[in-house]
Image: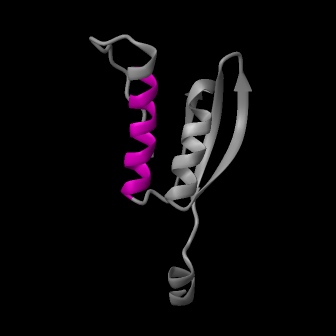
Amino acid sequence: MNLSLICEFKDQSPSFALGFEAGTVFEAMNLRVPSFDGTYHYASVDQLIAIAQSMNYRVVPLSKTEGWCELRFERLLTEEESDRD
């Protein structure tokens, strides 16, 4: 599933861009997407990890380059969901 979006924002501030980036990750998790990958700015990583932990996702680092890293988010089953399997 490709959750990327490429567009120019009228507000070019770093805080807006990072917030939008975090919002796209949150929305994918809110939709309970089982697993998805993306390339994220280093400045977002701590916030993305916090979101992932609160939404019951594991963060798997895939690669990193100057200023950017590729991450995979994997949804973890809750005990209740595991019991159903």
* Number of numbered discs: 0
Q: How far across and down, in percent of the image, does residue 80 sit?
A: 51, 84
Q: Residue at x 57, y 30 (%)?
A: 39
Please indicate whether residue 13 sits to the left or right of residue 38 in the image: left
Q: Is residue 32 left or right of residue 81?
A: left
Which residues lie in the magenta part? 17-31
Q: Which of the pair 54/81 is nearer the observer?
A: 54
In the displayed orientation, state which residue is furthest to the left.
10
Question: Is residue 3 visible from the viewing direction of this image?
Answer: no
x and y percent of residue 67 in the render? Answer: 66, 18
Which residue does the image show at 55% across and 41% down from the upper left? 48
Q: Is residue 78 above or below residue 55?
A: below
Tell me where residue 28 appears, x and y as whole percent. 41, 49
In the rendered view, would you say 42 is above or below 28? above
Give the side of residue 54 with respect to residue 32, left or right.
Answer: right
Q: How is the image coloured?
A: one colour
Q: Main secondary structure of the magenta part?
A: helix
Q: Is residue 75 above or below residue 66?
A: below
State yes or no: residue 58 in magenta. Answer: no
Q: Is residue 35 visible?
A: yes
Q: Nearer the viewer, residue 37 or 43?
A: 43
Q: Residue drawn at (69%, 47%), measured in percent from left and top?
A: 60
Q: Quadrant of the C terminus?
A: bottom right
Q: Quadrant of residue 15?
A: top left
